[in-house]
Each structure stands twice: as structure tokens, then as C-alpha cells.
Amino acid sequence: MSVLAKKLLGIGVGVVIVGVLIGFYVASWATSFPQSVAAVSTRKVAGFSGTQLTLQTVAAIGPKYSPNNPDWVSYLVLDHGKWVHSTVFTVPANSLVHVTVYQYDGDTGLRNPFLAQVQGTIGGTVTVDGKAITSINPEEASHTFAVPQLGLFIPLPGVPEEAKNQCEFAPCLTSEAHRTITFTFRTGAKGRYRWQCFVPCAAGWIDGNGGPMQTLGYMDGFLDVV
């Protein structure tokens, strides 16, 4: 076999190996994509049929849900009475969505105070621990639930540092220290809408924006409007 033939054979084998590795990567990514969790139908509200999404935010997802990254901050969603590690939610188009967030993490603070303003909800408010508000102190923000394409920005205040009985790992219990945030918004046309947290809460990463902040299933996801 000539030198040229050997080189071409080597290149061909290398291309095949790279292709196989890419295939394994894509297959792994596809199978690890978070499952979509559908909002639960509720009674009619103001003439519109509504759905309910119940979420919780945690300071550490824990080994039960994420053995490789147990200390990552994360969202979870309630599905048929069980907390599921997913950030992909399915809701109907042109309808009301009622959201309850049990917020178990401490405050981190917003770099952009504008995001401390409630935007895009029915009535322009959210209810925090039973009190309707239109904004929070930017320094008290722990996370946000934001869907920019829908104009929805929800600041989530953190649990005070001195609070007793704080949750260590998910799933957290309502008997542990938390804030309860509720709000309602209306969806629009069918489509896939990106949502994310805008608080740089990834400790140990540059500017707090790596790791869970850029990984689907933790602090960002999709709202599938169908």
C-alpha cells in the first residue's frame, strides 16, 4: 500500500470515529432531554378555561435527581403529586395559566433592578406569602421566572438567611422554610417559548452564569403552548 493510500485510509478511519462519537453525543443529548409536563386543568376563571402549574426552586437539586450535579440550583415541577426534575411545560394556547412557586432558595440579588418589577401577569401583580405586590427589592431576589416572548417577568424573593429549618436537598417540603409566590398569565399563539432565570445564581461559575444557568432542566426551559 502506498504512503498516500495509507494517509487516505487513516483520514477515513478518523472521520468514521469522529462521526460515531458525534452520533453517541447526539443520542445521549436526545435521551437526556427533560420530559414535558402538562399543566393541570382547573375550573373556569373569568370565562376562560385555565390550567395550573406548580413549581419549586431549590438551592441544591440533590443526588436523588442529579447524581452528577447534586449541588446545582434548580427548578422542579409537580406532576400527578410527584416532584419531577423538568423545565419543559405544556400549556394550552390563548388561555389562563395559574402558577404557584414554592421558593426554597436564599437571595442572590439582581444585577438589573428593572427585573425586580412584576410584568405580564393578570392584574400586574404577584402574590407573595399572601400579599399582592408589583415589585420586590432587587437585593432580595433569589430567582426569576421569565418568558421574554410573552412579556412575562416574575421576580422571586429569597428565603431569609436566618430562617430556621431550611431545605438542604430537593424535593423540599412545605414544612421547611420557603416563600409562596402565585400569579396568573395568559398565553398567546401556539409555539415553543423559552423561559429562564435571570439571576446569576450558579455559585462557582464565572459571573454566576454557567452550569445550571445554561443547562436545560435546571434554571431554564421551554413553555410549549399547544
Image (cartoon, helix red, strand yellow):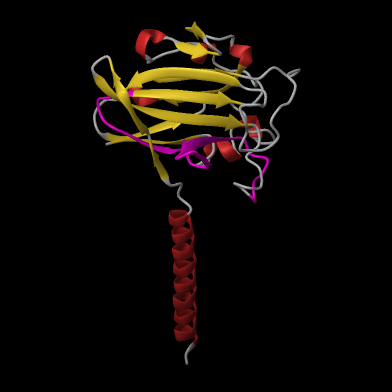
Residue 207 sits in which quadrant?
top right
Evaluate whether residue 198 shows in this view: no
77 or 11: which is nearer to us?
77
Residue 45 sits in which quadrant?
top left
Q: Indicate the position of residue 66 as horizontal and vertical percent values.
A: 61, 47
- The quadrant of the rendering that contains the C terminus is top left
225 lies left or right of 130? left
- The part of the chain drawn in magenta is 67-96
224 or 80: which is nearer to us?
80
Q: Indicate the position of residue 12 as horizontal and vertical percent values.
A: 44, 76
- Residue at 56% x, 13% y: name it: 129
18 or 66: which is nearer to us?
66
Q: Which residue lies furthest to the bottom in this view?
A: 1
Residue 93 shown in magenta = yes
Q: Indicate the position of residue 61 as horizontal and vertical percent values.
A: 62, 40
72 or 54: which is nearer to us?
54
Q: Indicate the position of residue 111 as horizontal and vertical percent values.
A: 58, 18
Evaluate whether residue 21 shows in this view: yes
104 lies left or right of 93? right
- Residue at 37% x, 8% y: name it: 123
- Residue at 49% x, 38% y: name it: 81
Residue 120 sits in which quadrant?
top left
Count of numbered circles on the image: 0
Residue 98 shown in magenta = no
40 lies left or right of 47? right
Q: Indicate whether 148 appears above or below 33.
A: above
Q: Indicate whether 23 appears above or below 196.
A: below
